[in-house]
Amino acid sequence: MDIRQLRYFLAIAKEGQITRAAKALNMEQPPLSRQLKLMEDELGVTLFDRSGKGLSLTHAGELLRDKAEKLLQEFNETMHEVKELDAGLHGMLAIGSVVSCISLLPPPIEQFRRLYPNVTFKIWEGDHFILGNLLEKRDIELIVARLPFESTLHTQPYSVLPLPSDPYVAVLPANWVSAPDKNTMLMSELADMPFLTLKTDKTIGMHHRVMIEARAHGFEPKVICECSSVAIIVALVAAGIGATVFPKSVMASFPLPTIKMLTISDADFQSEVGIIWLKDRYLSKSARNFIRLFEE
């Protein structure tokens, strides 16, 4: 059995029909049927149940599918790695970022583009769950996110490069701040304000961090809205609906005159940030060099 036959087998498993699989592979049906029979004869097992309208995998077929997918992925990654040994940097680097970290990307991307002008970028935005799924499917190679990384998928261990910590700040409607030159406030001043918090069913790390700090200062925030989006919270603050606490770098992406950002003078709590990738898996030369920019 060879790589070509595994590709044939996976195409049949995906399509559930030899005719459709042959079309997807751009080949005739009879040769594909012969290859499937050769595989089953060599293995001494039946890979597909042919009793229904379509083809469904037997237990042996399911096992081969799972193993074949991993083998082909490793084979493809090996081919890419070997080709890159003497090749110049080119192609596309796909990375993901949570919205709260978007402002951290332009400087390294600008520097990377100066060093490697033939590399283009594809950037995905989403929460930890969405980005973790894209990473494990290999649609992206790297993620820039708040730590700890809260993906619910654990089939692959992650490697993490911690980045400089990011202090939390209070974010208020500008007209709630009495003095135009006021730049600091106490954590306790948030106690009586309607509060907006970033929280979803799957990602709650930032929410918990802010709640813990508030309780340490003797109050429970009056949460009037839980939001799944940084942009929604910023819009609500700008409209005068409520206040929030965000990592300082978040607000670099939202320089609105109707919003005031204040340093919390009596609370020195930080948001941890990092670059995440799949541990012990192939990384393109572009991805490795992008990580290296953050290590310098």
Image: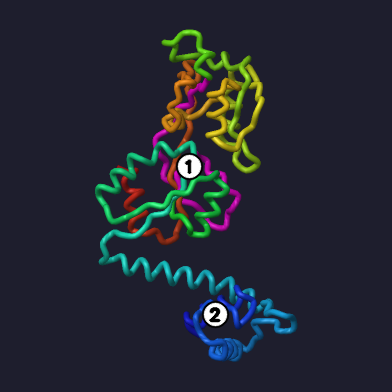
Tell me where the magenta segment starts and ends, as one range. 143-172
Q: Outermost residue toward the top?
A: 179
Determine the main secondary structure of the stretch shown in magenta.
strand
Q: Position of residue 59 (x, y in %)?
A: 68, 76
Q: Which of 112 and 70 lies nearest the eye of the viewer?
A: 112
**Amino acid of disc 1:** Ala
Q: Closer to the camera: disc 2 or disc 1?
A: 2
Q: Position of residue 231 (x, y in %)?
A: 53, 34
Mark 2 = which residue? 23
159 to 8, vertically: above or below: above
15 to 228, vertically: above or below: below
Q: Position of residue 258 (x, y in %)?
A: 49, 21
The answer to whether residue 42 of the structure is visible from this angle is no
Q: Which of 67 and 138 lies nearest the eye of the viewer?
A: 138
Element under disc 2: helix
Element under disc 1: strand
- Label of residue 261 in the image: none
Question: Which residue is rendered at x = 65% and y = 41% of the image?
Answer: 201
Q: CA distance from mark 2 to mark 1?
A: 41 Å
Question: Which residue is rendered at x = 43% and y = 14% of the image?
Answer: 183
Q: Is 143 on the left-hand or right-hand side of 133?
A: left
Of the 4 image quadrants, the one containing the C terminus is: top left
Residue 6 is inside the magenta segment: no
Mark 1 = which residue? 145
* Visual colour scheme: rainbow
**Amino acid of disc 2:** Lys
Residue 167 is inside the magenta segment: yes
Residue 189: quarter of image: top right
Q: Which of 115 and 122 lies nearest the eye of the viewer?
A: 122
192 to 208, vertically: above or below: above
Question: Which residue is rendered at x = 44% and y = 10% of the image?
Answer: 180
